[in-house]
């Protein structure tokens, strides 16, 4: 019963998302593309934060590497878009393996600081390696060719690109969701609640944390690969530590305890930013107030609070 | 004559200048229940921490079934067959009671490496989890969130989790600490039943002497990190040094309580 209601709501939401280009203005097609890409970015982050209990301050490194990888492949090799995305995922998985290997042995604040430090290093490299990355200007001037798989799609058209992003984000989210529901996902939740008990049950907690970190990095790289063609530039801002804060804010805003929380957080974040900046310059002040309220009064985030409220009403 | 499950040779742990455990030798035979007693600070928990891999011994050797496990990390020692409980509850508070056991079982059976199964439809593991809960008499609580069950039930849940790894040696660290007298009696009966089933080898630390004398086949008495005496419960009860060093302290307390 509960599942059926949930599936029905989800189906309506996805149908609504598919219909966006026909029912909303051009402007909102852009807004929703951004919501979907950042939602996937935040959901990948929540695998390590909400599920495994690791607060990383360096998640933008993987998002940014994904953007740069797609941009570089488009500029130098002109491969199909799907191939670009696979390169993005591979590059960010490799980077996550290296950063994760060095970071997951530490806990809590030390882990957070180390991931922040690595994130800053990646930013510095992208900023200064001008011959490869074009420094502070970033990589621009690339055009999307074919999609791959023999599909004939005009990716340069933002409306088409929106549907491609929607399809890829939905598929990636299903894969992430299945991982969360698996035995492996159950162990991740157990690690968040009590890592010591897990190691005394015979598992190497460090290995599990590392695998979760790599999976999260890979999906962040995929999101980054979707972002570069959307922005038509891969710039160092995508790697900046302030970019690492966005999935944290989105996950908390939406609710870390639910798989779809980060997507709700992403939608709230992007829409509020759009609406508030039309009235006032001080968007950050408003965001700060909202976040403080969430953390003080609505610990479970927008989605968690809504679900609790609905349960109350049903009684 | 079968071989010992656990052979400990001159095990020692020093923290700086303080010797917490000093030159302990011990053999644990299959299917026996051995109790380790001693006043607070006698080194029992440090001893456990070394056997279960939580602490590195300064000196000495720990052999499990003839295999050297000295200084291995906890997850490897657990895989080799030593499972332990803790003095403080060590469970997964936000999961249901049944899921707590499922986590341990999926670790034990290697399901934990599966990325694309659906954990909540793993009926084999679920049935097995319920069986372990039944053995501890807490299967009626299986749907409850672990954080809301009573303190005593949490301790029993932890024992169920410890047994779920099918250990060769079970270490219980003060299994009845903090329990009500009723819960203590129930837990003692349960451990007694499990020990009598012949499936397990137990090592137990305990403060409650009734529990110890009820359960133990052999008792190791520790005092200030050293072995004071080892023998059957009868021998321990009648040993003059033990009475002075350990049982005697309780008499002193009783005297103080009587004459405040």
Image (spheres, coloured by chain):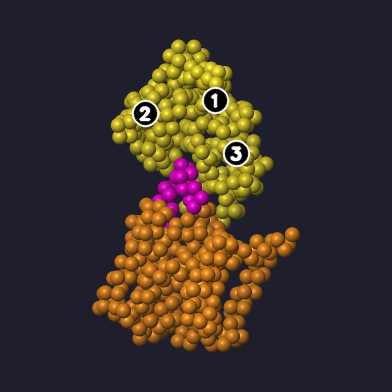
Chain colours: A orange, B yellow
User: How many numbered discs sit on the rendered protein?
Assistant: 3
Which of A189 and B165 lies nearest the eye of the viewer?
A189
Query: Residue A130: x, y in percent?
Result: 26, 78
Query: Residue A133: x, y in percent?
Result: 30, 77
- Residue lying at the far right of the rendered structure: A315
Q: Would you say residue A195 sits in the magenta stretch?
A: yes
| Badge 3 density bin: few <14, some 14–19, many ≥20, Cα 10 Å | some
Q: Tags 1 and 2 in contact by the CB under 8 Å rule?
A: no
**Pointer 3 chain:** B
| Badge 2 density bin: few <14, some 14–19, many ≥20, Cα 10 Å | many
Residue on which the image places disc 1: B208
For image coordinates 34% across by 25% down, the residue present is B23
Q: Which mark is residue B151?
A: 3
Q: Would you say residue A238 sits in the magenta stretch?
A: no
Q: Which mark is residue B21?
A: 2
- Residue lying at the far front of the rendered structure: B260
Q: Secondary structure at mark 1?
A: loop
Asked if one can make out residue A213 in the rendered structure from this viewpoint, the answer is yes
Which of A260 and A165 lies nearest the eye of the viewer?
A260
């Amino acid at each position: 019963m509960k599942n059926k209601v949930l599936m029905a709501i989800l189906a309506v939401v996805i149908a609504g998302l598919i219909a966006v280009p026909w029912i909303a203005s051009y402007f909102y097609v852009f807004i929703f593309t951004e919501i979907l890409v950042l939602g996937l970015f935040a959901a990948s982050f929540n695998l390590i934060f909400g599920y495994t209990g690791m607060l990383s301050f360096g998640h933008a490194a993987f998002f940014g590497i994904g953007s740069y990888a797609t941009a570089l492949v488009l500029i130098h090799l002109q491969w199909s878009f799907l191939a670009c995305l696979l390169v993005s995922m591979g590059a960010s998985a490799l980077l996550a393996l290296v950063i994760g290997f060095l970071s997951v042995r530490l806990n809590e604040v030390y882990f957070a600081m180390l991931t922040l430090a690595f994130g800053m290093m990646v930013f510095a490299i992208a900023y200064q390696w001008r011959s490869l990355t074009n420094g502070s200007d970033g990589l621009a001037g690339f055009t999307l060719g074919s999609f791959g798989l023999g599909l004939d799609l005009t990716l340069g058209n933002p409306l088409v690109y929106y549907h491609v992003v929607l399809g890829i984000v939905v598929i990636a989210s299903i894969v992430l969701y299945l991982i969360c529901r698996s035995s492996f996902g159950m162990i991740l939740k157990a690690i968040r609640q009590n890592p010591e008990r897990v190691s005394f049950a015979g598992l190497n907690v460090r290995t599990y944390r590392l695998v979760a970190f790599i999976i999260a990095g890979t999906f962040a790289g995929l999101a980054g690969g979707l972002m570069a063609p959307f922005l038509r530039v891969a710039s160092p801002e995508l790697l900046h530590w302030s970019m690492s804060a966005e999935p944290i804010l989105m996950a908390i805003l939406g609710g870390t305890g639910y798989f779809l929380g980060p997507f709700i957080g992403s939608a709230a974040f992007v829409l509020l930013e759009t609406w508030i900046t039309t009235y006032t310059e001080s968007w950050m002040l408003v965001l700060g107030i909202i976040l403080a309220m969430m953390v003080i009064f609505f610990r479970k985030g927008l989605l968690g609070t809504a679900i609790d409220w609905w349960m109350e009403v049903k009684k | 004559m079968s071989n010992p499950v656990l052979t400990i040779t001159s095990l020692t742990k020093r923290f700086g200048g303080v010797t917490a455990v000093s030159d302990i030798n011990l053999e644990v035979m299959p299917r026996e229940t051995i109790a380790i007693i001693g006043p607070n600070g006698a080194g029992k928990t440090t001893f456990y921490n070394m056997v279960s891999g939580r602490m590195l011994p300064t000196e000495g050797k720990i052999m499990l079934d003839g295999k050297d496990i000295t200084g291995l990390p906890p997850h490897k020692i657990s895989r080799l067959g030593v499972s332990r409980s803790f003095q403080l509850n060590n469970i997964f508070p936000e999961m249901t009671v049944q899921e707590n056991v499922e986590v341990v079982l999926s670790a034990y059976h290697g399901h934990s490496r599966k990325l694309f199964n659906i954990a909540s439809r793993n009926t084999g593991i679920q049935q097995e989890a319920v069986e372990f809960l039944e053995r501890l008499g807490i299967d009626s609580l299986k749907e409850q969130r672990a954080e809301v069950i009573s303190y005593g039930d949490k301790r029993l849940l932890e024992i169920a989790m410890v047994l779920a790894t099918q250990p060769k040696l079970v270490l219980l660290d003060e299994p009845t600490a903090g329990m009500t007298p009723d819960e203590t009696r129930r837990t003692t009966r349960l451990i007694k039943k499990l020990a009598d089933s012949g499936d397990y080898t137990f090592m137990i630390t305990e403060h409650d002497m009734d529990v110890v004398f009820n359960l133990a086949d052999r008792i190791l008495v520790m005092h200030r990190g050293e072995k004071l005496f080892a023998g059957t419960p009868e021998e321990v009860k009648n040993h003059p040094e033990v009475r002075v060093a350990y049982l005697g302290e309780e008499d002193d307390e009783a005297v103080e309580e009587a004459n405040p």
